[in-house]
Image (cartoon, grey):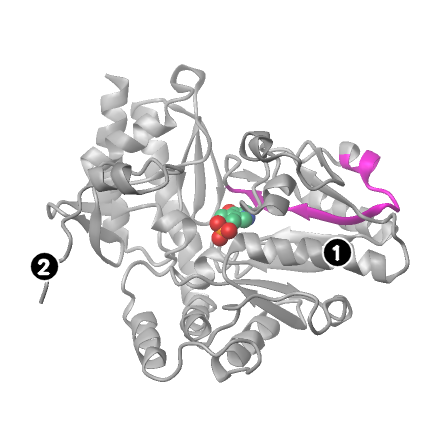
Amino acid sequence: MEQPIAVTRQSFDDWMVPVYAPADFILVRGEGSQVWDQQGKSYIDFAGGIAVNALGHAHPVVTAALVEQAGKLWHLGNGYTNEPVLRLAKLLIDATFADKVFFCNSGAEANEAALKLARKRALDKGNSSKNQIVAFNNAFHGRTLFTVSAGGQPKYSKDFAPLPGGITHTPFNDLAAAAEVINDHTCAVIVEPIQGEGGVLPADPAFLQGLRELCDRHDAVLIFDEVQTGMGRTGELYAYTQYGVVPDVLTTAKALGCGFPIGAMLTTDELAKTLGVGTHGTTYGGNPLATAVAGAVFSIINTPEVLEGVKQRHQWFLDGLNKINQQYPIFSEIRGGGLLIGCQLTQDYAGKAKQITQLANEEGVIALIAGPDVVRFTPSLIIPEQDVKEGLARFARAVARICS
Ligand SMILES: *Cc1c(COP(=O)(O)O)cnc(C)c1O
């Protein structure tokens, strides 16, 4: 057999379109919440592939589901349905407000479907001027042109003008500002229950409740982007149940496949009718390989053991991070829900989140940022206590270094 091509971190700079700036090591293997690099150095994984690997790496049940399906049927195209996709749809419907599901391959695609549904629904009702979308500052909804425009971070969209029109942004958690722009021309409001990429900022319950009422009053579709908060991340299957506010459309991805690309848009019978045969679609959406994996993932995550365990692990993180912060006061706030935790840096350490995660890498732990001033943790939902302790000890050493 031919030798595999030798690759190093330098190969990335040589061969890859430079949209990312990955860490200066290459990971080659993972098991549970540990990963190892080319040199055999171990890291505790507190990032979980950006809130994706909710069951850690190489989970035996998920791996078995993948291998079993891989030997049967990978892909058919949507001219033919398949068993795993129908089973996954039923699991999602039985566990949520939804009656119908559309499958795709990513969070952005799920949001794209949701926004297209809302536009078409208003048009189908004969209201061609009901096409306005209300979204929020700092939001993140994906990188397609439509979803990046709905996102509230102009740095991600400004270079790609002209952008799709009809999207207005108001401050997150400011209900009065939202009420000023939501009217009968509004076809959709899209919001994250906890802004993830924007800094781990939870919505106030009254804000989401108020958006629900405004959408009802003006016949607008309320879309909850649960791409990051969904699939047990906050300690409930979906965060909307914690808020007691039911959306019309919910988007989910990330942890749904635990690393196998899949996304979904959940909605009601009434709204689902909008997207009739031929009006929307995607080649890979709902293919048997992806949905067999997600079905296994779902059956593990949607259990009291795992969901209760998230709440317990939240406390382990809070206790450990507060202890670190007592010794080295670098965080002004530790916030978030379940295992979506954001640590806001104090003024003195503003802008240093990236540097802290780089030092954390050196100490053998992987963490994330959410903007320049927030260190974010989104580990596996089943991370063992020992790994939480060891990872936080390593993280403490990184914090000690930034403080010295
Ligand atoms: C990650 C994320 C997306 C985009 O998902 P992709 O799979 O990267 O397209 C959308 N919305 C939220 C809230 C996210 O966290």
Query: Where does the C terminus fall, quadrant-wise?
Result: top left
Location of residue 368 with respect to 123 vertically, above or below: above
Location of residue 401 with respect to 47 vertically, above or below: above
Apparent side of residue 71 relative to residue 43 in the rendered image (left or right): right
Q: Residue at x 56, y 75 (%)?
A: 89
Cβ of disc 1 within 8 Å of ligand 1?
A: no
Q: Which residues are magenta?
A: 178-196
Location of residue 175 with respect to 311 vertically, above or below: above
* Percent coordinates x, y for residue 204 in the rendering: 65, 40
Number of the front mark, 1 or 2: 2
Query: Do labels 1 and 2 touch, CB within 8 Å?
Result: no
Q: Nearer the viewer, residue 126 or 36?
A: 126
Task: Tell me how far mark 1 sits from mark 2, CA to CA.
Answer: 52 Å
Q: Which residue is under mark 1? A: 118
Q: Nearer the viewer, residue 404 or 362?
A: 362
Q: Residue at x 50, y 84 (%)?
A: 83
Apparent side of residue 107 relative to residue 2 in the rendered image (left or right): right
Q: Residue at x 81, y 36 (%)?
A: 181
Residue 179 covered by magenta stretch: yes
Q: Which residue is under mark 2? A: 3
Q: Nearer the viewer, residue 72 or 11?
A: 11
Question: What's the amino acid at mark 1?
Answer: Ala
Q: Going from the N terminus, do you reach mark 1 or mark 2 first?
A: 2
Query: Where does the N terminus fall, quadrant-wise?
Result: bottom left
Question: What's the amino acid at mark 2?
Answer: Gln
